[in-house]
């Protein structure tokens, strides 16, 4: 079922790439998509990811907004003297569990203001984050866990 | 941009030449890459330049009206680039294996096959 | 006649097959083959003697004018008969003599090839065919001199003989080619009516010199004589056959043969005369301290060869007559004496004359044989050698200007030969017996029969000269000087000055023999300075060549890759710039200077990156820098309407980075190798290359290009190639075979990488 | 009208691109530089691409522009993470005002295992 | 010159300037990681340049180059990082 | 080697995206920028990314076929694409076309088939090189 | 349709190589396919030769695109003869390889690489397009790179570094020259170039381009002062590889020089061909002296390649029909002979475990047949009549004397003598001399284990090539006649032009 959905999505992607909305192109895209899924079947495994693609796309748009805010802040940083920055590398315990969730969370975090995901611990429990403005570590952690992670989990689960 | 490209070509050739004259294998590879770039840019420039008019025939049309870029030098360069890539890939690995086997990347220490006994 | 030649080669080739099973009779079987050829030619004797010429042409390489044109006249028939007759004797003799040798079968192959080639040479009318046989005699001589090849000297002197005669051969070939340009043909007979043209040709002197170099080297004339005594390393039958009776006379033959076309000028005659005289005297003198039987004979041979050459230089009718008789006489007695020397060596185990004495009881037949030959060699009546020497003296006396001087030279030379004869032909048999390494006994019949026959022949020829020699003489003379001699041959000319000279020669020779040891004592400390020895010249040239070869190879092939690159690039840039600056106004170019901001930025980035790479002290930085260069290349392609190129460039840049990354940390860090001075040199070379390329681009882009191709591709792409991306249509259709080659390159490169990484053999390749 | 909207997007995008460039130049250490540029350049390029899509008004072009934007959003943070991690191994110095480093000592030097 | 042309013109200059600035970071480093980040950014900005250049020249064929560039730049960056990690690993 | 979860996960989802793009480049290369060569390179890039993120073993497992086979197949297809021209009695390598229009691809003909050969070959050689080096690495 | 056959020498090796790749783990299959393949190529090439002799130049427009728009494959006499010789050498090497190449190298795709090499060589001979020539050169080069280092011994690497770098440098020059020539003349087709060049205004510019081509091909042909890669590398790989390289690779460079400087660049003979003449003389001399200085069997042979290339270039530089015919004859002769000499050196090495003359000896005693089999090519190389090399030398010398280049011919003769010196040196040291001290009756262990089938497989190609040498020598007329016809075709390029471009 998931595969079929992804196949259809790939078909749509093909139509988009080609740039002409026609049935033949969609069929062509479906065929190619099927081939690709077959080729990369072991890469994808049996994840439930595909159902959530629309939700994810929404989430991405949400983050474009975040991104713009982040950038305004960067603009401010760049233009003003840098001395008031207080960078730090903070370990953030993770609620999100699957690889996909972790990846999404880490990436989104990077795209939001002032933070950069550096690495995930081997047991996938901790995310290390470089942040530009950190007064103290604990309040930073709280901010993240109650902010982005919570929202993400709402979307994902 | 002819003038600038001519100078760039000259510099690339010069750089390639300089680098293949080094004693270190790695630098020689870089020199060969420079020479490859230089040759490609040379063919490109000498085949005459056209800005913003690639040789693509619009949908429904049969042919193109001048000015448009000469597609032939492009095709030649494309072939040359690809060949160059294959050869380069081989050369890189060759140089690596040479270093592993001979134990140095100093070309001055690789004279045994020329030596007069 | 070609059939005979082919039979000759075929017979030589099968020798190894039949040698082993028929070992005991091999001498007889082998001798039957020269005998067959001898008889075949002998059957033509009357025809030739009565003034006919037999000519036979078989096409070989007609488009080069090279054919088997065989011509049998008096001169060639004489030589053929000598060659084959002595061949019979030598083959028979060798059948016994060579039995103890390893690989005696090969000996017969070589000698067989030699004899056939020698016959082929003297009957060839086509200069190139003649030359082919000529070279074959050199090669077989080489193989025979080196027959005892485990011996270093044999190898060394075989090579010496080959190089000297081979070098002369090359000169001869050039001379022949130049000569053929005058007549437009390689036929010698085609030259006969062109004497004037030949002598007036601008190449005449060159031809004479080249031909004579060929002849002199082969016939061991001064200063090329040194190889002949050294060639005595060969088994004795070879010395008798090649290096005395036949091959060394090939050069004489060429002079005689070419005399007709090239002779008659001072250059030709005087050169031959002088060189011949020098050789005659010089060789005889050099023999004074020899103790080796074969060496002694070799020097006497040299002297005779000089005499023969000198006679051709004199060129009078009498001289030609003398030449003719002398050549026959010499072949007979010298062949015999060599074979006798061989018997002595074979049966006693030494060739040192000082250790040979009193053998008459043990080897009576040999003694008799030796005596006949020796008398002939000393010029004692009634042997043919006597007639020979008499005629030589008569011919010399005819020479007005040089005459007496030459006579003196001849007398001294011949006196020394007399001394040699006594040493070789008499001393071993007379006096007290000295014990020898081997218990001496008489040779088997196969070994004494031939020499004895030759010796007896010498006697018969002396008594009945006209029967044996006379009839061919005129025909031969026609071939040499294009007139009949109209002279008869007589044994006895009466008591005259010439006879007196013969007598003086004999006495002088005997005198020298008896005072020989004293002379040796006196001259004991005298050593010829190196500079006067042509053999030292040879060594000097050879060593000099070797030193120079080593020197130049060390300089050129020096092992430094960058030096090789510099050679190539400097050559390229120098020559190409030279060609470029031949163009008028090559530098008056008006390029398009208009530059936009982003173009400036691109140029700036690519230039800075380039220098960044060059000056970088770390590999990774270099790779980042070269990545930028590639990347900017892509941008240039985009700006100038080449999206496919840009795509490809970006893709390849990235893959190259991946490759580097996978390889890089296995490679060493940069070290500072180069010295500042070599950096400066490299910068100059690099600037030269760069500057040249810049100029080329500026110059070429300033002229108009009209190409039909550009139009054709865009016009045909959609209707013919069914595609709108013209570049891609070119790649997969118009020039698809380029792409086929291109992907093959990729495939090979990948297989190569795979093999390189997986297969690691040790230094012996195992 | 479309041209004006498109032009505005182009200019806006260019400004963000310039900002990210300046950020790259001015920020004190690698981590702060990445922090600044990852966002700004992604946004700037995105805006320019949107401007382009609007200019052509063609679904094919729009799809391509969108593909690039999505791709950049997917890859830019991953790239930043990978470089940041490598830089940390490589002991790239942190800016002197970096006052907390909870990553310090957490990497196993041998296996690059992170606890 | 209408507005879009003007905007494109200015954008090309601004993007070009940014590229130069990024290139400056690439040259001065100081660490190799800085250079890699700069290289990554350089390719990303080129995408923007291509987009604007397409508008300037009124041709769309170049836009696909942008997609490739994006993915390849990513791959290149990842490879460099891969190398760095290899290098630092004992 | 410790692989990054983030990169590994990202690579799994980038792989099909890149592959579809590579097909896209291959098929429409006759009319728009692209073609077998670039297509093949992009496909190879997809696997290269997967290899960097997950290691060579995983990448080889994913590819299933030995790259030399892909190389051979690519060459074989390129050679086979020349056969129809000979069969219909035309000069060697003359394009033979079906008279039907397909979307994106346009007309189908032997030159496209040839391009498919190029695509496979490029994919094969790039992977052969990268995998050989990576295996050597261990 | 018959003209389609001329693509086969290019495509067949590719097909055989690909077939082998599909069975890439089975060495035995590779051997048979390779042997079969070279045999098929030989038959095909002879058929083409017969066709070309009877019908004149055959050209094929690949893809049916009218020349000069597509790529023309052209078989004139010169090309065809080269293709035939290539097939002969390919076949001989196939046999020799089965007998001598170690299983490891066989496993790592030695035979497909041989076929790829032959493909590149044939492509270079047959193409009528200068860029396509570049492509085939690269196919040939990359295969040769791999063959050269296959096995990965230290010597191979040191040699390969130089071989690869210098050849890549030459390729870069070649590529630049192609680009520049297109920029000046606007076409890539050789016939079209030949047709247009007389009307090109910038003749001097063409001369500059021609110099670049001369350098590029000069490196491949190993002429002075561009030959350094050859002596540095040719003695490093297995003998079968050395042999095929020695026979064929430089000859492709010589072929290209002949093709370009007879068909295309004849607008400034006073400059270009004089350069070639000077280079020819120095090539002959430095090569032969280099050989004299060596004491390694294969190194001597390698340097002699250079020297002999000088003779071929001399023929080209003299630029008379006879001279060019001489050059062509020389090429034919030399390929056969030089390959064979390398084969012999390989047998000696197998037997005695060395190429070093100081360690060799006694081979004549032990194996007289091999002595004979050495002497035939060696004496031929030294120009001893009536073997093939004599006629080759003779024709070049005759041609030189006809145009009164006496000094040059003097050098050529001297070089002939020095060649004789080197060949007899090998003969002396390897065959005649006894085993040196410490190596008495030495026989390499591995030799004793070689099966007699393999021994026959090794000797068979040597005998085969020696027979060809003898046939060329004794039956030189047809060879010379076709060399002459080939030279005529080259000098009267109008026939070539018409055949490729049609009656345009
Ligand atoms: Na060669
Ligand atoms: Na070669």
Image: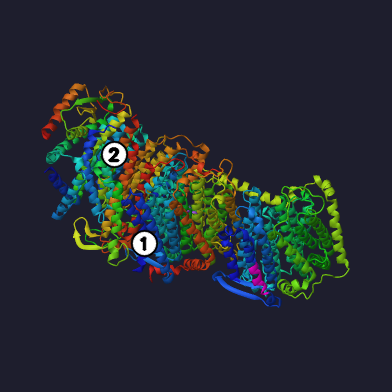
Q: Position of residue F16 (x, y in %)?
A: 21, 44
Q: Is mark 2 within 8 Å of ligand 2?
A: no
Q: Label 2: few (<14), some or many (≥20) within 10 Å?
A: many
Badge 1 sits on which subunit? G
- Magenta region, main secondary structure: helix
Q: Quadrant of residue C470?
A: bottom right
Res. G411 in view: no
Image quadrant occupied by the C terminus of chain C: top left
> Which chain is mark 2 on?
F
State yes or no: residue C42 in magenta. yes
| Location of residue E5 with respect to C466 vertically, above or below | above
Q: Is mark 1 within 8 Å of ligand 2?
A: no
Image x and y of residue C468, in percent:
74, 71
Q: Quadrant of residue F61?
A: top left
Same chain? Circles 2 and 1: no
- Where residue C190 sits, quadrant-wise, is bottom right
In the image, taking residue A91 as reference, residue C635 lies left or right, namely: right
Residue C478 location (% of width, % of height): 72, 74
C529, above or below D74, in the image: below
The residue labelled by disc 2 is F56
Per the image, label 2 sits on a secondary structure element best described as helix
Answer with left or right where residue G94 lies relative to residue C455: left
C349, A95: nearer the viewer: C349
Q: Which residue is mark 1?
A: G8
Give yes or no for residue A61 being in the magenta stretch: no
**Total tally of numbered discs in the picture:** 2
Q: Which residues are magenta?
A: C35-44
Circle 1 packing at 10 Å, graded few (<14), some (14-19), many (20+), is many
């Amino acid at each position: 079922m998931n595969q079929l959905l992804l196949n259809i999505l790939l078909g749509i992607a093909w139509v988009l790439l080609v740039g002409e909305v026609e049935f033949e192109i969609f069929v062509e895209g479906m065929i190619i998509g099927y081939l690709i899924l077959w080729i990369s079947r072991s890469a994808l495994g049996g994840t439930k990811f595909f159902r959530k693609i629309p939700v994810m796309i929404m989430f991405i748009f949400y983050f474009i907004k975040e991104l713009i805010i982040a950038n305004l802040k960067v603009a401010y940083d760049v233009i003003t003297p840098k001395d008031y920055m207080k960078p730090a590398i903070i370990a953030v315990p993770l609620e999100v569990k699957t690889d996909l969730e972790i990846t999404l969370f880490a990436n989104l975090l990077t795209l939001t203001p002032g933070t950069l995901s550096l690495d995930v611990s081997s047991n996938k429990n901790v995310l290390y984050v470089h942040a530009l403005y950190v007064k103290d570590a604990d309040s930073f952690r709280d901010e993240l866990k109650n902010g982005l992670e919570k929202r993400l989990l709402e979307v994902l689960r | 941009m002819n003038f600038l490209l001519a100078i760039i070509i000259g510099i690339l050739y010069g750089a390639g030449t300089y680098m293949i004259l080094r004693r270190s294998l790695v630098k020689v590879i870089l020199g060969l890459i420079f020479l490859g770039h230089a040759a490609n840019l040379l063919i490109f420039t000498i085949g005459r330049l056209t800005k913003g008019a690639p040789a693509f025939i619009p949908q429904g049309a049969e042919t193109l009206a001048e000015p448009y870029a000469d597609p032939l030098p492009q095709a030649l360069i494309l072939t040359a680039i690809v060949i160059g890539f294959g050869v380069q890939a081989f050369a890189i690995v060759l140089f690596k294996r040479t270093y592993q086997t001979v134990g140095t990347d100093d070309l001055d220490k690789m004279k045994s096959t020329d030596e007069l006994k | 006649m070609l059939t005979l030649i082919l039979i000759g080669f075929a017979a030589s080739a099968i020798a190894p097959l039949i040698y082993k099973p028929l070992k005991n009779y091999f001498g007889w079987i082998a001798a039957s083959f020269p005998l067959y050829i001898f008889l075949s030619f002998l059957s033509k004797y009357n025809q030739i003697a009565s003034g006919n010429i037999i000519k036979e042409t078989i096409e070989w390489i007609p488009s080069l004018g090279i054919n088997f044109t065989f011509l049998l006249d008096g001169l060639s028939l004489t030589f053929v008969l000598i060659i084959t007759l002595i061949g019979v004797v030598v083959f028979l003799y060798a059948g016994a003599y060579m039995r103890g040798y390893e690989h005696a079968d090969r000996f017969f192959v070589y000698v067989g090839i030699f004899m056939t080639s020698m016959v082929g040479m003297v009957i060839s009318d086509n200069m190139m065919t003649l030359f082919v046989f000529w070279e074959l005699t050199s090669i077989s001589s080489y193989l025979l001199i080196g027959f005892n090849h485990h011996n270093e000297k044999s190898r060394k002197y075989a090579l010496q003989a080959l190089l000297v005669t081979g070098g002369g051969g090359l000169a001869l070939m050039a001379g022949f080619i130049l000569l053929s340009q005058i007549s437009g043909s390689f036929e010698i007979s085609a030259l006969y009516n062109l004497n004037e043209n030949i002598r007036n040709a601008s190449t005449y002197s060159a031809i004479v010199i080249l031909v004579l170099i060929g002849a002199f080297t082969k016939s061991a004339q001064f200063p090329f004589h040194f190889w002949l005594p050294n060639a005595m390393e060969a088994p004795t039958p070879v010395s008798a056959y090649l290096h005395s009776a036949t091959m060394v006379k090939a050069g004489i033959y060429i002079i005689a043969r070419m005399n007709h076309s090239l002779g008659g000028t001072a250059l030709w005659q005087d050169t031959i005369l002088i060189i011949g005289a020098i050789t005659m005297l010089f060789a005889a003198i050099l023999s004074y301290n020899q103790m080796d039987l074969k060496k002694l004979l070799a020097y006497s041979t040299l002297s005779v060869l000089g005499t023969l050459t000198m006679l051709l230089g004199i060129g009078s009718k009498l001289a030609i007559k003398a030449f003719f008789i002398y050549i026959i006489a010499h072949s007979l007695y010298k062949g015999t004496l060599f074979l006798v020397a061989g018997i002595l060596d074979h049966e006693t185990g030494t060739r040192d004359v000082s250790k040979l004495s009193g053998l008459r009881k043990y080897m009576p037949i040999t003694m008799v044989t030796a005596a006949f030959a020796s008398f002939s060699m000393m010029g004692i009546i009634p042997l043919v050698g006597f007639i020979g020497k008499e005629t030589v003296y008569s011919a010399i006396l005819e020479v007005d200007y040089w005459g007496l001087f030459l006579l003196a030279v001849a007398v001294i030379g011949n006196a020394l030969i007399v001394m040699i004869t006594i040493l070789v032909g008499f001393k071993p048999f007379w006096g007290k017996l000295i014990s020898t390494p081997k218990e001496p006994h008489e040779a088997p019949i196969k070994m004494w029969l031939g020499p004895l026959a030759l010796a007896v022949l010498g006697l018969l020829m002396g008594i009945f000269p006209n029967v044996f020699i006379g009839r061919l003489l005129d025909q031969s003379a026609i071939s040499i000087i294009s007139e009949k001699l109209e002279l008869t041959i007589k044994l006895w000319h009466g008591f005259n000055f010439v006879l007196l000279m013969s007598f003086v020669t004999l006495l002088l020779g005997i005198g020298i023999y008896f005072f020989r040891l004293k002379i040796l004592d006196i001259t004991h400390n005298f050593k010829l300075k190196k500079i006067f020895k042509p053999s030292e010249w040879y060594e000097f040239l050879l060593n000099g060549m070797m030193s120079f070869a080593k020197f130049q190879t060390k300089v050129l092939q020096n092992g430094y890759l960058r030096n090789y690159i510099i050679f190539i690039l400097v050559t390229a840039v120098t020559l190409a710039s030279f060609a470029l600056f031949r163009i008028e106004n090559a530098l008056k170019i008006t390029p398009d200077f208009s530059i936009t901001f982003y173009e400036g930025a691109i140029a700036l980035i690519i230039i800075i990156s380039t220098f960044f790479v060059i000056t970088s002290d770390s590999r990774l930085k270099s790779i980042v820098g070269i990545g930028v260069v590639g990347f900017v290349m892509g941008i240039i392609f985009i700006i100038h309407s080449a999206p496919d190129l840009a795509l490809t460039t970006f893709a390849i840049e990235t893959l190259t980075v991946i490759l580097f990354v996978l390889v890089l940390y296995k490679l060493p860090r940069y070290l500072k190798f180069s010295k500042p001075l070599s950096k400066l040199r490299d910068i100059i070379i690099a600037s030269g290359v760069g500057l040249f390329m810049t100029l080329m681009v500026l110059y070429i882009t300033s002229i108009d290009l009209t190409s039909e191709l550009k139009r054709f591709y865009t016009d045909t792409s959609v209707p013919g190639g069914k595609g709108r991306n013209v570049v891609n249509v070119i790649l997969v259709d118009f020039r698809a075979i380029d792409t086929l080659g291109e992907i093959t390159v990729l495939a090979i490169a990948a297989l190569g990488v795979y093999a390189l990484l997986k297969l690691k053999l040790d230094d012996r390749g195992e | 009208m479309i041209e004006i909207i498109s032009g505005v997007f182009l200019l806006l995008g260019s400004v963000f691109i310039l900002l990210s460039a300046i950020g790259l130049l001015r920020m004190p250490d690698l981590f702060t530089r990445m922090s600044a540029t990852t966002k700004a350049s992604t946004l700037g390029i995105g805006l320019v691409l949107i401007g382009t899509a609007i200019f052509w008004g063609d679904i094919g072009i729009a799809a391509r522009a969108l593909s690039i934007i999505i791709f950049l959003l997917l890859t830019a943070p991953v790239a930043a993470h990978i470089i940041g991690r490598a830089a940390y191994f490589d002991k790239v110095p942190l800016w002197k005002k970096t006052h907390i480093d909870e990553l310090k000592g957490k990497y196993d030097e041998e296996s690059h295992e992170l606890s | 010159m209408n507005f879009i042309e003007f905007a494109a013109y200015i954008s090309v200059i601004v993007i070009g300037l940014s590229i130069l600035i990024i290139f400056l970071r690439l040259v001065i480093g100081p660490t190799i990681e800085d250079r890699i980040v700069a290289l990554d950014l350089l390719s990303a900005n080129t995408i923007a340049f291509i987009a604007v250049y397409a508008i300037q020249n009124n041709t769309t064929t170049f836009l696909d180059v942008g997609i490739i560039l994006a993915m390849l730049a990513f791959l290149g960056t990842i490879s460099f990082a891969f190398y760095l990690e290899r290098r630092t690993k004992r | 080697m410790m692989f990054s979860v983030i990169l590994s996960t990202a690579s799994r989802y980038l792989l099909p995206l890149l592959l579809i793009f590579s097909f896209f480049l291959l098929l429409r290369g006759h009319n728009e920028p692209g073609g077998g060569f670039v297509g093949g390179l992009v496909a190879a890039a997809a696997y290269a990314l997967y290899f960097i993120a997950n290691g060579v073993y995983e990448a080889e497992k994913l590819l299933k076929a030995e790259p030399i086979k892909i190389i051979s197949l690519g060459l074989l297809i390129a050679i086979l694409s020349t056969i129809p021209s000979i069969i219909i009695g035309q000069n060697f390598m003359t394009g033979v076309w079906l008279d039907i229009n397909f979307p994106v691809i346009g007309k189908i003909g032997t030159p496209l088939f040839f391009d498919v050969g190029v695509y496979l070959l490029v994919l094969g050689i790039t992977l052969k090189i990268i995998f050989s080096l990576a295996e050597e690495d261990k | 349709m018959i003209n389609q056959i001329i693509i086969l020498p290019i495509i067949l090796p590719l097909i055989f190589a690909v077939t082998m790749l599909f069975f890439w783990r089975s060495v035995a299959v590779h051997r048979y396919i390779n042997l079969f393949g070279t045999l098929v190529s030989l038959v095909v090439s002879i058929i083409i030769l017969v066709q070309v002799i009877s019908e004149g130049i055959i050209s094929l427009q690949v893809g049916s695109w009218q020349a000069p728009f597509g790529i023309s494959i052209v078989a004139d006499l010169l090309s065809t003869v080269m293709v035939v010789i290539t097939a002969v050498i390919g076949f001989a090497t196939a046999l020799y390889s089965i007998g001598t190449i170690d299983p490891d190298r066989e496993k790592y795709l030695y035979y497909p690489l041989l076929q790829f090499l032959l493909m590149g060589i044939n492509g270079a001979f047959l193409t009528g397009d200068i860029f396509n020539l570049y492509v085939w050169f690269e196919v040939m080069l990359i295969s040769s790179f791999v063959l050269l280092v296959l096995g990965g011994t230290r010597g191979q690497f040191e040699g390969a570094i130089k071989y690869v770098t210098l050849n890549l440098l030459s390729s870069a020059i070649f590529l630049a020259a192609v680009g520049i020539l297109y920029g000046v003349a606007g076409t890539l087709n050789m016939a079209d170039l030949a047709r247009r060049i007389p009307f090109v205004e910038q003749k001097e510019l063409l001369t500059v381009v021609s110099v670049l081509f001369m350098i590029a091909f000069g490196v491949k042909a190993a002429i002075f002062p561009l030959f350094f890669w050859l002596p540095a590398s040719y003695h490093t790989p297995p003998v079968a590889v050395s042999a095929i390289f020695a026979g064929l690779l430089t000859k492709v460079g010589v072929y290209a020089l002949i093709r370009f400087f007879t068909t295309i660049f004849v607008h400034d003979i006073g400059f270009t061909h004089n350069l070639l003449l000077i280079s020819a003389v120095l090539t002959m001399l430095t090569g032969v002296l280099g050989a004299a200085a060596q004491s390694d069997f294969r190194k001597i042979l390698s340097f002699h390649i250079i020297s002999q290339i000088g003779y071929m270039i001399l023929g080209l530089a003299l630029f008379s029909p006879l001279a060019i015919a001489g050059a062509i004859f020389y090429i034919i002769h030399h390929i056969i002979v030089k390959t064979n000499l390398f084969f012999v050196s390989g047998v000696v090495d197998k037997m005695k475990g060395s190429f070093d003359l100081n360690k060799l000896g006694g081979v004549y005693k032990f194996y007289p047949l091999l002595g004979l089999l050495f002497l035939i090519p060696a004496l031929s190389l030294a120009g001893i009549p009536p073997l093939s090399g004599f006629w080759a030398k003779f024709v070049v010398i005759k041609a030189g004397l006809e145009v009164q280049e006496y000094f040059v011919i003097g050098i050529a003769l001297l070089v002939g003598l020095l060649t004789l010196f080197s060949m007899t040196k090998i003969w002396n040291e390897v065959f005649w001399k006894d085993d040196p001290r410490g190596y008495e009756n030495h026989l390499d262990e591995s030799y004793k284990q070689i099966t007699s089938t393999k021994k026959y497989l090794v000797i068979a190609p040597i005998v085969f090539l020696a027979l060809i040498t003898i046939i060329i020598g004794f039956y030189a007329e047809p060879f010379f006649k076709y060399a002459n016809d080939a030279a005529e075709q080259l000098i009267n390029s109008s026939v070539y032009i018409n055949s490729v471009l049609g009656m345009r």
